[in-house]
Image (cartoon, grey):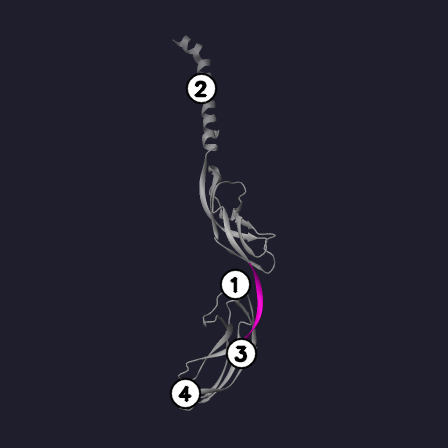
Amino acid sequence: MLERLRNNAGLKLLSLAIAVIAWSYLRFTPNPVIATARFTESITVPIVATGLAAGEIAHLGAREATLTVDVPREGGTVSPQLVRAILDLAGRGPGTYNVPVQVVAPKFEVKSLSPTSITLTIERVEERSVPIAVRYTDRNRNVVVTGVQVAPLAATLRAPTSSLVRVAGVVVKVPLPAAPGTFDAMLRPLPIDARGSAVAGITLDPNLVRVRAVFARGSR
């Protein structure tokens, strides 16, 4: 029996060595299936317009794009800051266009994109000088206006063409006091349309004007 064990000692050492090598390989060698495994991730990023000429503005039909990207499993999640959705508007003048969305996503494979293109309108941004009128509120007061001064007398409006053509005038609203007296304040001018409603999207310069008014007692 002892002789048989001595004769098999080399074989046992060889078997032990093979077992250690096999364990080390399985323990420290990446699993090729896991190493090549990938997964998809959906992210939403803002759409950015580039290449607009000076004095132009683009009205986009959509502001965000949703992408599905293919990511290596060991790469972790995708940071939206690494992905950009771009509309190249270089060389386009005022008008309506359908522009493809270009995706810049380094190290990631884009599997799907929505929307793939955007319908947009490019307009010129124009300026116009408009006189400032005074509009009085609380007209049921028993006072009359004997003098009013506005400084400056006009405001410069800056806006896309479609917004600027809606402006019929610029007003400042001055409340009538309950008793005779003077009014002196900085007021914000308001662009209005033909119906007297405020027009949004207009930049005014200056954004505040000084209004001084004198009120006397009215006759009943």
Which type of secondary structure does the marked residue at label 4 adopt?
loop
Which label's residue is closer to the chain start, 2 or 4? 2
Determine which residue is flagged by label 4: 142
**For residue 99, above or below residue 218:** above
Secondary structure predominantly adopted by residues drawn in magenta: strand
Q: Amino acid at mark 3?
A: Arg
Look at discs 3 and 1 and give the one toward the viewer: 1
Q: Is residue 31 visible?
A: no
Q: Which residue is mark 1?
A: 162
Which of labels 3 and 4 is toward the front?
Answer: 4
The disc labelled 4 sits on which kind of residue? Asn
Q: Are marks 3 and 1 in contact (CB under 8 Å)?
A: no
Mark 2 highlights which residue? 16
Asked if the magenta segment contains residue 198, the reply would be no
Q: Distance between the Cα atoms at labels 3 and 1?
A: 29 Å
Q: Residue at x 46, y 23 (%)?
A: 22
- The numbered mark at residue 210 is 3
Q: Position of residue 209 (x, y in %)?
A: 53, 76
Q: Which residues are magenta?
A: 123-131
Instruction: Label 2: state its secondary structure.
Output: helix
Report crowding for label 2: few under 14, some 14 to 19, many 20 or more residues within 10 A (C-alpha): few
1 and 4 marks in contact (CB < 8 Å):
no
- Residue 27 figure quarter: top left
